Image (spheres, rainbow, N blue to C red):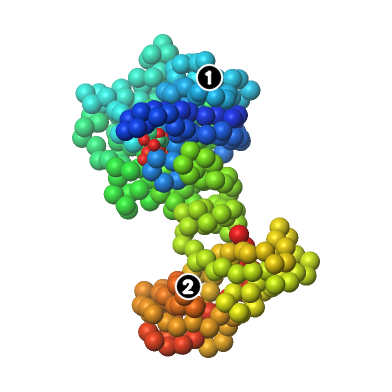
């Protein structure tokens, strides 16, 4: 449906703002280099204030970069106003026209572009079918639920067939259940429309569920770019590991190496790890262990003491102390397993493939 799938490239993009408290300039976005492939779904993810919205607004043209260049396809777009860019934005607030019905809201952008009536009718009808609002053309937008309003907002953006669709936290005004439904819908629609999408959220599960690539931002910098699996299994630092999912951190020292395998000494216990190419013998390292990557058992690599043991249905939630370090473990299928109680001594057991070195 889209005219042409377009990629987006940010080259050394920075944005400087004045801090209203101190009056000093600071980088809201610093030396950002991003390459977004045509047709892919890319999410900007990070804590509040990390520069996600600023990045998106610079791509849309609502803010201009202080350094660097943005390209849409092969075209540099810094000098273009928002309406001259081949982008459309879906806002958190929906930004619908309140006294118009659904049809007129969606048709608005096409009328501005002076399309003929029949083409408008055909395009609006097709888009409403795509977003699941077929037959609701005459409904006023103030009579719609939040989810329906968001579908109208999406239809308005899609109908003009932009090269790139931009989303600024589009689901934050919806309740938790609807957010999950709508994110699946957004992903389906993006794939059916075959359009490039850039999506801002601070919700990591939303990002994981819909993205081809996730860009993790922290304090104006890009911390990591990768697929959800790369980011989850191979975080580049503690910030990323902690921000995406839950993570346990075990500090140790590389005792020896054989090829890309290594032995890490953690509190006097020797732990086998894989993929240790980047590290050398004697180096201090941190092992990242996801809660679902370990179990509590009678035998294992690290002796521990259970300090919390809670039945959660699909898993037993353990907190155990390994020396002075708290380790969280989600042990699945507890029905078929021995359950350890608070005060028990046991072991943390894991496969070496479940460990990641930082
Ligand atoms: P959130 O999730 O809270 O929306 P964000 O990651 O989208 O956060 P931005 O809105 O991009 O963050 O803001 C980045 C930084 O720039 C923040 O410190 C913010 O306070 C600051 N900022 C944003 N807009 C302006 C502005 N117009 N003037 C001054 N500072 C600004």
Q: Name the residue under label 2.
A: 325
Q: Is residue 8 visible?
A: no
- Furthest toward the right, the residue is 259
- Residue 223, by quadrant, is top right
Q: Does the residue labelled 2 lie within 8 Å of ligand 1?
A: no
Please tell me whether residue 145 is drawn above or below residue 11 in the rendered image: below
Secondary structure beneath label 1: loop
User: Taking 203 as reference, is 191 above or below it?
Assistant: above
The residue pinned by badge 1 equals: 78
Q: Is residue 100 left or right of residue 118?
A: left
Image point (58%, 59%), residue name? 233
Horizontally, residue 176 falls left or right of residue 200, namely: left
The residue at 35%/32% (across/down) is 22
**Residue 259, image x and y in percent?**
79, 66
Which residue occupies 53% across, 19% down?
A: 78
Please state the horizontal and vertical placement of residue 160, each as a whole percent of the image: 45, 23
Q: Percent position (x, y) of residue 282?
A: 70, 67
């Amino acid at each position: 449906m889209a005219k042409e799938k377009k990629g987006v490239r940010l080259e050394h993009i920075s944005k400087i703002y004045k801090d209203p408290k101190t009056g000093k300039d600071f980088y809201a976005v610093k030396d950002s280099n991003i390459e977004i492939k045509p047709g892919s779904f890319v999410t900007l993810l990070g804590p509040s204030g990390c520069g996600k919205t600023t990045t998106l607004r610079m791509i849309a043209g609502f803010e201009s970069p202080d350094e660097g260049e943005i390209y849409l396809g092969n075209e540099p777009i810094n000098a273009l106003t928002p309406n001259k860019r081949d982008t459309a934005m879906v806002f958190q607030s929906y930004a619908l026209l309140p006294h118009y019905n659904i049809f007129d809201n969606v048709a608005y952008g096409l009328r501005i572009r002076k399309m003929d009536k029949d083409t408008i009718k055909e395009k609006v009808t097709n888009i409403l079918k795509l977003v699941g609002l077929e037959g609701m053309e005459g409904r006023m937008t103030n009579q719609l639920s939040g989810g329906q309003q968001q579908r109208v907002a999406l239809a308005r953006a899609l109908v003009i067939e932009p090269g790139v669709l931009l989303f600024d936290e589009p689901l934050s005004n919806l309740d938790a259940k609807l957010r999950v439904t709508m994110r699946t819908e957004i992903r389906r629609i993006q794939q059916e429309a075959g359009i490039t999408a850039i999506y801002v959220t601070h919700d990591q599960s939303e990002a994981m569920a819909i993205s081809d690539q996730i860009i993790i931002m922290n304090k104006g910098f890009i911390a990591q770019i990768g697929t959800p699996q790369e980011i989850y299994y191979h975080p580049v630092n503690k910030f990323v590991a902690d921000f995406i999912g839950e993570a346990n951190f075990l500090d140790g020292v590389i005792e020896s190496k054989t090829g890309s395998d290594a032995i890490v000494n953690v509190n006097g216990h020797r732990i086998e790890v894989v993929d240790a190419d980047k590290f050398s013998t004697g180096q201090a390292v941190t092992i990242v262990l996801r809660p679902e990557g370990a179990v509590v058992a009678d035998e294992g690599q690290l002796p521990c003491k259970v300090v919390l043991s809670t039945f959660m249905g699909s898993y037993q939630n353990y907190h155990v102390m390994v020396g002075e370090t708290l380790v969280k473990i989600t042990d699945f299928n507890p029905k078929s397993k021995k359950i350890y109680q608070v005060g028990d001594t046991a072991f943390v057991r894991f496969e070496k493939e479940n460990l990641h070195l930082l």
